[in-house]
Every structure is written in C-alpha cells, then in structure tokens.
Amino acid sequence: MSEGPSTLVKETARKILLRLREVPEGVSKDELVDTLGVSKPSIQRALTWLRDVCDSPVSFDRAAGRWRLSDPHFSLPLSDPQGEDLAAVMFAAAILAPLADSEITERVRRLAEQMDAEIRERTDAAPDAPGTRPGAIVASVSNASEVDPAVSGALLRAIGREVVDLRYASPWAPHGQEARAYRVEPWQLRMHDGAVYLRAYSLTHGEARSFAVAHVESVLPVEGLAPSAAMPAAREIWGDADPAFGIDYDRPETAKIRVRGGVARWIHRLRWHPAQVDRWIEAGELLEREVPYRSCRELARRLLSLGDALERVEPAELREAVRSHAKALAEIGD
C-alpha cells in the first residue's frame, strides 16, 4: 500500500495555495522556489499532489509559463483549513443536530474542533479568539426525521459498489404490518425538507424506487452479487432530467400561484426550487410564483400551509388537490 504525501509536500502545497491566491495572474515555478524557499523538486511534487490527488483547480498556463489557481476559494480543509472551512463545518454541525443521531453530530463537532486547533496553531491565534465555542450556532426544525448512522453509513458504502437487502417499514403500510424485504442497488442519498431519502434500483420491483431512510430498519450487503443496473446521470437519478419540487411522484407539472401580504414577503425569501420564478404583481404585496413540481399531492400539502394568503393556484389539478385537503380539514369535528 502506497504511503501518503510527506509533511514537506503537504506544507509546500499549503504555501503554494496561499501564494496563488495572492497572485491571481499566476506565478512561475522559479518564482515559487524563490518566494517559498523550497527546492524545485519539492515544488513539483506538491503541484502534482495538488493537481492529481487533491483534484484542485491548479493548472499550468503554457502560453504564460505560469501556474494559476482558477478558484480562489479552493482549500484543503483537513490539511490546510481556513476560517471559512471551519464556519462551514460549524453550520453543518448545527443543521445536522436536529436531524441526525448524536453519534453523527459528535463526529462533526470533533472535526470542527480539530480544524479550529489547526487554524490556531498555524495563525498563533489568541486563546480567546472566536472559534468552536459550544452554542455559537444552533438550529431547529419542525419537520425532521432522525438518521441512524449505522443505516446511513451502510448505504453510503454501498452506493455504486454493493447490492443490499433492506428491511423497510413503510409508513403508509397498514398498522401492525411487518417490515418488508427489498433487494436494491443504492444510487444516492438526498436530504429533502428535513428527511433523508434513498434512491435505488430495486431488484425486487424491477425499477428505480425511493425509500425514506428513517424507515429502513437494517441494511445487509449481498455477498457475491455486484450491481448490474446502469446508474443514471446525476441529474436523472431522481426521475427526470430537470428535477422539480418534491420527492414523491404524482402528476408532475408547473405551478403558478399568487400569495398576498406578509406571507408573500416571507416566502419571497424562501427557495422551494432552483428553477422557481418570482414576480411581484403588486410591489411588496402580491407575489406570483412559478415553480415546477414532481408531485401534485406533495405541493398541495405545502400550499395549504399558506392559509388565506393564497389567492390563486394553477393548474386545475393542483387547485383541486388543495381544495380537497381544505374541505377535509373543514369537516373535522369538535
């Protein structure tokens, strides 16, 4: 088994990244040798490691004879953490806290602490410098399902590599029905509205299916069996080439809704889907939102939460789904 890069290579790579961030037009190898005080062979080994192993956006401009960094935000969070890397991990830890098992959040917290210690050692930060103070950022959600690290870890290891048997207790199955077994080839995990889903090719069904990970009771690799179904392109894994709002699949279409008042100003800052288009019919008062959706029934449940601020819903199928939900609620007894 080959050894990893030496401490000298990693330290030289860190210094090269710092220099390339400072000089966007790029620097030659000789300039790196002079500036960093490192031999040319060490510079070359560090550049090779950055480019070939770290997949960094460092490239050589032959016309100019200079090395350039095309993305100044690129960093090596584990060997050369930046303040922005630490902030990102702290945000991730806070977001995960209401969703994930304590073991997962504890691992992320320890990662943040190690990055913080590395930054302090490198920058000689004062003991009271802002860092990974407990409670610096917290998050809460009102609609989330917990993630079992044993289940999610097994699924992540299996993606693209293994066939697994799932024990899955569908929340829509009749009460008391035992969990069913499914043999699947995992493709991707996706977090959507506080819940994690698995997209996989189901050998049991002979087609792609989605599973709520919170309801997966166990994951067992199938020995001697390798994945055979071709994994779709990244943008097609969840069912279509232009992913729309939702995980469920039910009469997909494009919605056009109008919302008034404070609720309109509130949802104007909320991103339901990257392809949504908002326009103010009345400035700051009446908002029209156009958004593609995968599931009529799923979007109808979300629209119902807008209450009397919702003034218009198209197409007719979606409008009727909202009305049906509202009628059922209105008939609830005392």
Image: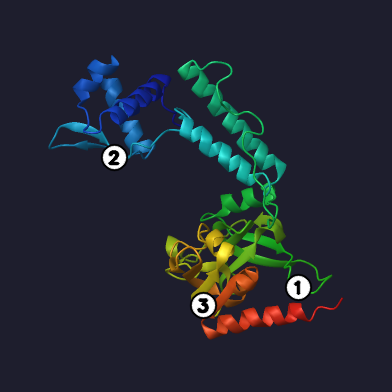
Rendering quarter of residue 26: top left
The residue that label 3 is drawn on is 252
Question: How far apart, in angstroms, are the residues tagged by discs 3 and 2?
Answer: 39 Å
**Which of the two discs, 1 and 2, sits closer to the camera?**
2
The residue that label 2 is drawn on is 70
x then y, percent, for residue 299: 58, 72
Mark 1–mark 2 contact, CB under 8 Å?
no
x then y, percent, for residue 119: 49, 23
Is there any visible trace of residue 226 in the rendered image? no
Dot label at residue 173: 1
Look at the numbered disc 3 and give the secondary structure of its residue: loop
Which of the two labelled residues, at mark 1 and mark 2, occupies the earlier sequence position?
2
x then y, percent, for residue 318: 57, 80
Mark 3–mark 2 contact, CB under 8 Å?
no
Which of the two labelled residues, at mark 3 and mark 2, occupies the earlier sequence position?
2
Q: Which quadrant is the C terminus positioned in?
A: bottom right
What type is the residue that disc 3 sits on?
Pro
What type is the residue that disc 2 sits on?
Ser
